Image (cartoon, helix red, strand yellow):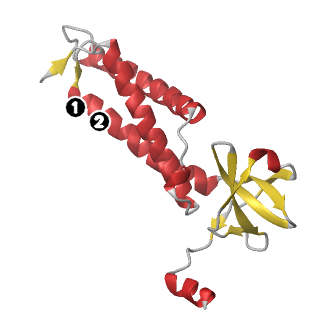
Amino acid sequence: MKTFNIDMTLIIVFLTGLAYGTTYIYQHTFQAYYELPSIFIDLNINTLTGTLFFIIFGLTMILLISGFFTNLILKPQSSFLEDIPLWFLLLLSLFVIVGSVVGGKMVAEKKENYTVVKQKEELFIVVTSYKDNLVIAPIDLKTDTIKPKFHTIEMKSAKDSEIINFEHGIRVDKLRNSKELKKEIK
């Protein structure tokens, strides 16, 4: 079986790339639940730090447990961490990426606490933040649904806001189709 020695520089480059990729995938699947376009994905130090922490923690635990059982069962000549098989690293990467896809969707579906902002006597849910803005969508309190009709407001203009618990989360109305839009324009 072909193995290679891991240099610390390669580990840092690998983890950085994995952090950016999984953060993007997580943000994409989270925002896809709300039908929010991917142009609102903002990879910043806050999102990357959280993702990198969980990647490092998860990979470290998996490597230590794998190394322990490999040493216990096979009693190899060298340490498991010195000769990690390439397929093992690829499998770990795949596991982390699938976890970010599932995690993004699950977090959006299970989310119950939302910031509600009042703008011109109308209520909006804060879906996400993007740079120095909040991305908001109108809420129908009777059905606890939002319309995928987004606006951005500056964070500082969200003075009249409150965090509200929606017991069963928020559902998203279906996207309108082009026929509905054409009827509205006529």
Residue assigned mark 1: 87
Q: Is residue 105 at least partly visible in the picture?
A: no
Farthest residue to the top: give it.
Answer: 77
How many other residues sit within 10 Å of disc 2, few (<14), some (14-19) or many (≥20)? few
In this view, 184 is above or below 109? below
Quadrant for the N terminus in the image: top left
**Residue type, label 2:** Leu
In this view, 133 is above or below 74? below
- State yes or no: discs 1 and 2 in contact (Cβ < 8 Å): yes
Left or right placement of residue 4 versus residue 112 in this view: left
Where residue 185 is drawn, which disc sits there? Answer: none
Left or right placement of residue 98 versus residue 112 in this view: left
Residue 130 percent across, percent down from the top left: 62, 46
Residue 97 percent across, percent down from the top left: 39, 42
Residue assigned mark 2: 91
**Residue type, label 1:** Trp
Helix or strand or loop: what does disc 2 sit on? Answer: helix
Give the total of numbered labels.
2
In this view, 73 is above or below 156? above
Q: Nearer the viewer, residue 89 or 153?
A: 153
Q: Is residue 85 at least partly visible in the picture?
A: yes
Residue 78 percent across, percent down from the top left: 22, 8
Residue 4 percent across, percent down from the top left: 19, 18
Structural distance between the alpha carbons of marks 1 and 2? 6 Å
Farthest residue to the left: give it.
Answer: 1
Helix or strand or loop: what does disc 1 sit on? Answer: helix
Indicate the quadrant where residue 20 lies.
Answer: top left
Q: Nearer the viewer, residue 78 or 41?
A: 41
Q: Residue at x 81, y 50 (%)?
A: 157
